[in-house]
Image (tube, grey):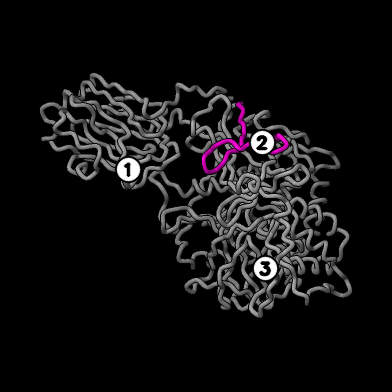
Amino acid sequence: MGENVIKSEDYSLLKDLRVKIEGEEEGFTLCFWLYLLKPSTFPAILLNQVVVAGSAPFLALKDNKTIVLFPLFSSHKEVPDPRISTPWNEFPHASMEIEFPLQKWTHVGCKVSTEFLRLHIDGEIMAEQSLPSSFGKDDNSNCLKKINFAGNDVRGYVHNAKVLPLIFSVKDHYAKDPPLQLAIDNSSASEIEEDSDGVWSIVGGKASCRRIFSLDVILLNAFDQPINKEMEVVASLLYADNGGPVEKTNDAEAPLLTSYDGIEYASCDRPSKILHGRASFKLKISQLSSKCDNRLFRIRFEILKAVGFSFLEALSPPIRCISRNRNIRTSVIYKKSPAATQPLNGSQSFDDVSVELQKIAVHEAKPSSLSKRVRFDQEKISTVEQPEGECNSHPRNAIKAERIDVASLNGTHINFEEADNSPSDSESTGARNSSYKTMSTGGNSVPDSTIFKYCLGSMTERSSMLKEIAPSSSDEEILEFAKQVAIYSGCSHHSSQIMMAKQLIEEGRKTWNLISTNNNHVHWDSAVLGIEEQFMKISCCSTRSLKQQDFEILKKIAGCQDHLAQENFENLWYWLYPVALTLSREWINATWKSTSPKWIEGFITKEEAEYSLQGPRGLQQPGTFVLRFPTSRSWPHPDAGSLVITYVGGDYTLHHRLISVEFIYRQMELKQLHDLLLAEPELLRLGRTIRSQ
């Protein structure tokens, strides 16, 4: 267990940094960690060197956000004007070519001698410059004997600043004593919806309507490794526009509440402890945006004993707190056209789509949000017969689209479609056309109220409904229910989750009885053997077993420690079963089985995927990608079991794209997944996945 105190003396404001160097005639190495907030103006001096006439820049941030390291100036005549950047190019300097990251701990190493300048970022040499023999020839050696540095008035923090000999390894300093940072774990979010403008929507208000939403924050070091410090984190609700605290409701109730054992407390009164690097919150918002002039909120998480350090607090995205009534769209318009079936409502929009059948639908993946759905022309939902000789360890009822209309993208095989952020719990829902008033298949009728309740319910409510309905329903009744939900919601992705419900529940019950032997709890190490056996059976893959890192991800999804309860097992199973079902498909099974190259490394988090694509010198080359299963998508979420492509785009930023695996065109010759991926112009090469140890 690590030290449980964050010492304020280990961190200082950049403007308060003072460094003295004496007696280093040949040169010196200055190393420190820098957490830089956005400067108000560019260019900006980060670190000054004191000269006879006042000060001169030593380390500066140019207007393109690149770092510049200057030599030591022996007299005021040599000093460039810090107010303008153009004259800086007239002086010897070492300048990195990529942007310096803001609001992230970054290690800076400066090696300065009479002969050269060398700038290190995160332990790697990013810029180097030889000094002309004429520069400071008379006085430069004397300057090296006694130097004073001072931080400038730029918003930022410094950790572990050290003056070291010129021959000292910057990497050694980089690897030792990294700073800490608090972050939100988006993969842990539940009961949170994300709108098209990137704003979270959370159901709040009066006690009878508001919903509990869950969120974890993690304490990490600069290498994104969890740090075990048993400290307390407190959550508070702020206005997004000015950071001011949100007022209490008219009933004098705290705006943000924490739920413990079914009892609500003001969040400020009940901090959450960090255990194993993580603090978990179950929160409710009692104040509505509509009661506060439609202003947006944010949740701020901060460590109690380290208040005031920006890097030890985490802010959520903007939040729009709405009432439950706003999620139930009773006045929606259903418009039927011969080309598509689509709902029209105020919270969801669709891109125009062509009628060409060329692609597999792929859309943006965002935590706890629904992606924009493709529209269907003359869609037919039916049960797919399993071919002779194919893996038949379980019934495989799937949704088959007779025809799918999606926008074409320059003739490529996969259509990348940006996500809108339609609500994940209250999916886009439109009233049906009168032609669908009578819903029956073979005399089995599905009540409208049941379909509406499912479409408008949360993920928890949908799960409860399916667990109640599916076991006692016939395959025809489940098929009819899936078909009508697809029509009501305008999204056939729900259908596959409904169709798998009966088998998922039955297989889950058998697996739990097998591993628990009728006990309430089972030791994790004993349970994983049975879980792995069932996974390999359902995925139709006997040649590839799960690794220790895979089990660690499953353990986090289950939310357990050393012992697994039935509730934990269900959390795990609702994520794992759709994944195994996806891998059983012929077109992706070969991709999973492949070990050279290993197209799918295993179960990895979003953070691990992003880290894999960030080399020591920055992002890897555009087109580099890795595949993963999103840990935030569990049954009956319509995207459960889908794959995500995390890749470096042409704009040198990371993108996350969710592959919709439910629909393959009948006209299209069956291909392997990796063949389709490499046919995409944005995907050029498979990246190497780096997994957490």
Q: Amino acid at mark 1?
A: Phe
Dominant secondary structure of the residues highlighted in magenta in the image: loop
Sequence order check: which comes first, mark 1 or mark 3? 1
Q: Which mark, residue 248?
A: 2
Mark 1–mark 3 Cα distance, whole angstroms, equals 48 Å
Q: Nearer the viewer, residue 383 or 435?
A: 435
Q: Is residue 325 positioned above or below 215 on the image?
A: below
Q: Is residue 240 magenta?
A: yes
Q: Which residue is mark 3?
A: 343
Q: Which residue is mark 1?
A: 42
Label 1 residue SS: loop
Q: Is residue 537 positioned above or below 292 on the image?
A: below
Nearer the camera: disc 2 or disc 3: 2
Q: Amino acid at mark 2?
A: Lys
Q: Amino acid at mark 3?
A: Pro
Q: Which residues are magenta?
A: 231-254
Q: Is residue 436 magenta?
A: no
Mark 1–mark 2 Cα distance, whole angstroms, equals 40 Å
Neighbourhood count class around disc 1 (C-alpha, 10 Å): few under 14, some 14–19, many 20 upward: some
Label 2 residue SS: loop
